[in-house]
């Protein structure tokens, strides 16, 4: 078995571990297509808040919808494993389409989100 | 369990109680999430009659809702309207839109014997700062077109204002009329307040007389 044959599964295992591993960062931002109305997005926040690993002490019970930038901010309890697929599924069941999720810069995020 | 409770509430409302505007969505914008439900009450004044509407909505999934509207006026229940909006959403960047096909039935809960079928085709779109809704429908002997379009202003803290203009045209056995006027909508978290005043712009309708006023408040969960 050559290097190329080993590289792909190894990369998948690594990615999978990163996704389900304890969080390095507690706050994440998720780009969400079409989320332009807070009233309509009430369900997204509701679905996300139900997830066990959401930290309700941050943002607004752990979730903040930013309709100006079509983003949702979530806070994950430190050390809690989380699953991006579950988060995306919660947003989809809330009626919107998530695009990508990335960790927030802690210092910049507090300024950005409170605006 | 919550679905059962919501369905039960809708059934209870259905046991208690028509006129134009009855086809319109309970709330076009929400709830668009799985298992979402909501209720609103509206007071309308038209044709020298004041009607109180009790309306409920349950969302099985974003593509499928059930709505029930029950009118009450002059101390009597009117004919309730049960509808099943089927929606196809498109979310793209800073906008969201949907096409809706809504079969409905008007039930003779007001004391008559006639059942009326209805069908509506709608399109609505919302982006940062703009909202529009187009709806063409047939219910009983009435064919109508509704257009809502205007601006939205979000404060970034969970509330927003919509200032819209509405055009409503009706054609029925009694004639035709066209109403037009401003609509003001306010959202705060899961609460919606809506007020509209429409002037009678064209009148060739033997059963319609004067302007139209509607004020309502609703909540979604």
Image (cartoon, rainbow, N blue to C red):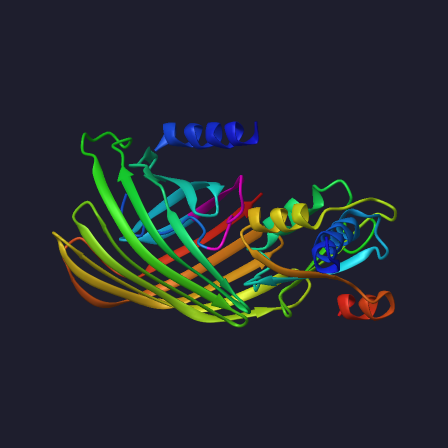
Visible in this render: residue B188? Answer: yes
Residue plotted at (36% across, 61% down): B123
Q: Magenta includes B33?
A: yes
What percent of the width, then of the height, locates residue A98? 60, 58
- Tell me: A2 left or right of B94: right
Measuring from the top left, give residue B29's x and y in whole percent. Answer: 48, 55
* Position of residue B71 in the picture relative to residue B209 (left or right): right
Displayed quadrant of residue A4: bottom right
Instruction: State whether residue B203 is above or below residue B41.
Output: below
Residue B108 image position (x, y, % from top left): 25, 32
| Labels in figure, total | 0
Q: Where, quadrant-wise, is the C terminus of chain A in this rendering?
A: bottom right
Q: Is residue B150 left or right of residue B121?
A: right
In the image, what residue occupies the spot 44% across and 65% down?
B125
Res A68 quadrant in image: bottom right
What is the quadrant of residue A66 in the picture?
A: bottom right
| Residue at the extreme front | A1
Residue B137: % across, % down? 25, 54
In the picture, measured across the screen, residue A105 lies left or right of residue B114, that is right
* Residue A78 included in the magenta stretch of the image: no
Residue B112 versus residue A39: which sits nearer the camera? A39
Residue found at x 48% / y 30%: B9
Q: Residue at x 21, y 39 (%)?
A: B116
Mark yes or no: residue A55 visible. no
| Magenta range | B29-42
Towards the viewer: B147 or A36: A36
């Amino acid at each position: 078995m050559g290097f190329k044959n080993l590289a792909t599964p190894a990369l998948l295992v690594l990615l999978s571990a990163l996704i389900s591993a304890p969080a390095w960062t507690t706050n994440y931002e998720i780009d969400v297509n079409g989320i332009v109305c807070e009233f309509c997005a009430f369900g997204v926040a509701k679905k996300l808040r139900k997830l066990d690993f959401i930290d309700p002490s941050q943002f607004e019970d752990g979730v903040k919808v930013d309709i100006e930038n079509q983003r949702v901010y979530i806070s994950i309890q430190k050390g809690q494993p989380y699953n991006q697929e579950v988060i995306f599924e919660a947003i989809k069941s809330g009626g919107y389409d998530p695009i990508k999720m990335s960790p927030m810069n802690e210092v910049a995020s507090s300024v950005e989100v409170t605006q | 369990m919550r679905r059962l409770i919501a369905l039960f509430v809708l059934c209870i409302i259905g046991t208690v109680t028509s006129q134009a505007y009855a086809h319109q969505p309970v709330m076009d914008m929400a709830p668009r999430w799985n298992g979402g439900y909501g209720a609103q009450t509206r007071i309308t004044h038209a044709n020298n009659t004041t009607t109180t509407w009790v309306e409920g909505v349950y969302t099985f999934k974003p593509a499928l809702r059930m709505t029930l509207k029950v009118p009450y006026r002059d101390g009597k229940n009117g004919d309730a309207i049960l509808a099943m909006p089927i929606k196809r959403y498109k979310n793209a960047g800073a906008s969201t839109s949907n096409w809706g096909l809504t079969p409905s039935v008007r039930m003779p809960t007001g004391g008559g014997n006639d059942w009326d079928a209805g069908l509506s085709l709608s399109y609505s779109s919302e982006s940062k700062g703009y909202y529009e809704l187009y709806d063409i429908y047939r219910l009983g002997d009435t064919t109508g077109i509704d257009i809502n379009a205007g601006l939205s202003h979000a404060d970034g803290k969970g509330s927003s204002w919509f200032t819209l203009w509405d055009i409503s045209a009706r054609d029925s056995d009694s004639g035709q009329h066209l109403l037009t006027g401003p609509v003001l909508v306010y959202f705060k978290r899961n609460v919606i307040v809506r007020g509209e005043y429409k002037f009678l712009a064209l009148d060739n309708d033997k059963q319609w007389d004067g302007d139209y006023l509607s004020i309502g408040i609703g909540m979604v969960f």
